[in-house]
Every structure is written in structure tokens, then in C-alpha cells.
Amino acid sequence: MEALESLPPFAPTLPFKFIGGQPALDLLNTVDWTSAGPLKDRLSDYERLLGWGTEAGLLGPTSAGRLRKLSAADPAAAERALEKCRELRRVLHRCVVALVSGRGVPAALERLQPYLRQALVHLVLEPGSAESVRVGWAGLEESLDGPLWPVVWDAVQLFVSAEVERLRVCGGENCGWVYVDRSRNGLRRWCEMETCGMTAKNRRRGRRPRQPHA
């Protein structure tokens, strides 16, 4: 396995994977949470953040296009928004780890509060199909921070739901990816069987482990 010190901090060519079961968790899984800190960050620039938001279903093509123009007009502001997204990602990961372990929950949730307050300022209710109502985001296309708001709301909705008891952190070494365990028996141990699960199986058999999340 590749040594941690040799892993790149950014990995702009690695594909995004959507295995968390929720968009907020999939954001956490855009980086590997190793003992040396976050490595192989797929969110290498603001354009990649827009790509992730589009693939995750949080941004439509029109919204992504308008935000792309905003970022091109003010690269420094786009970089600040990207760093804010990375900080939110760290905060959410700390929340999940705390909720899974049952330790440090109040402190972790306190760090999430400022992001929640900012998101709620922009939350609006919109008519959906037929007689339904859906959540929307006022000003999302005019703010480079806009992609963060639906992520925060998605995380909060998960944290206050019954599925919070199904939150899991992958058992793979130097992985740290998270997911909702919706398996029938509730015994899912790995983010992906073909990466971390296979690495653990090969290690038990004394074989060379596969590189996770390639």
C-alpha cells in the first residue's frame, strides 16, 4: 500500500463516489480521512465543487453555470468559498464520528451551528408537483457559498431522523468514509467491499492489499 506521506493532498482526477446514502455524507467522502490528516482531496478547486454538487443532485445546470461565472469573475472569493466548504466538511465529519461513538456530540454540533444559521436564512418553501411542497434556496445562484446550504440542511435532517442510529464510519484503515447502513441486517462494515473490504480480506490472507478509493 502506498505510504501516507507519499499520498497527494489533492486528487483532481479521481471520480466522485456516491456511497454514503445522503448528499451530505457524500461530501465527506470527497477526501480520505487518514491518520496523517485529510488526503487525496477530490475538491481541488471551485469547479470541482460545482461538478460534485451537480452529480449529487444539489445543483441544476443553470445554477452551476451562474456560479461558474461568479467564480471566474472573482477567483479569490471562489477560493474562500471552497475553503469554507472544506471546513464544513471537517465539521460534519466530526459530527458523524461523535454521533457514531457517542462522545463529544455537544461540542461537535456547536461547531455546526453557524453553518446552519446561515443556511436557514436562505431556506424557502416552494410549491412542488401537484399539492406537494419542497425546500428551495433563495439567492443560491448569487452566492459562491450557495452549494453549502443544501448540504447543511441535508445533514441536519439526517441527524434528527431515526436513521442517525444507522450512521457508520468505514472500518478500513486510513479511510474514514461515512455512510448510512441501510443493509437488512445492519452489519455493513465497509464504505465499499471492493476497496476497504477487499483490503481487509487480503490482509487477513497475507496478500498485498489493494489501494483504496482509486
Image: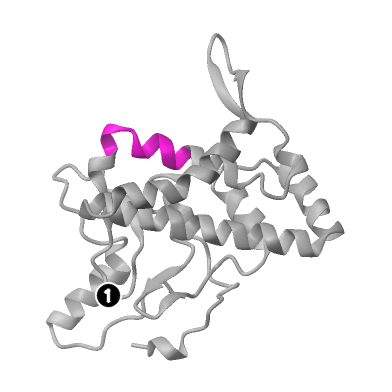
Is 68 within the magenta?
A: no
Whole-percent x, y for residue 128 in the image: 59, 18
184 sits to left or right of 16:
left
Whole-percent x, y for residue 163 in the image: 28, 37
Quadrant containing the C terminus is bottom left
Residue at image coords 49%, 57%:
89
> How many residues crowd around disc 1 within 10 Å: few (fewer than 14), some, or many (20 or more)?
few
Magenta stretch bounds? 154-163
Is there any visible trace of residue 17 in the rendered image? no
In the picture shown, does residue 78 fall above or below 140?
Answer: below
Whole-percent x, y for residue 34 in the image: 37, 75
Q: Which of 179 and 207 is in front in this view?
A: 179
Q: Dot 1 lies on which element? A: loop
Residue 29: quadrant of the picture:
bottom left
58 sits to left or right of 154:
right
Which residue was labeled with disc 1?
173
Residue at image coords 33%, 87%:
1
Q: Which of 87 and 25 is in front in this view?
A: 87
Whole-percent x, y for residue 109 in the image: 39, 46
In the picture shown, does residue 121 fall above or below 192?
Answer: above
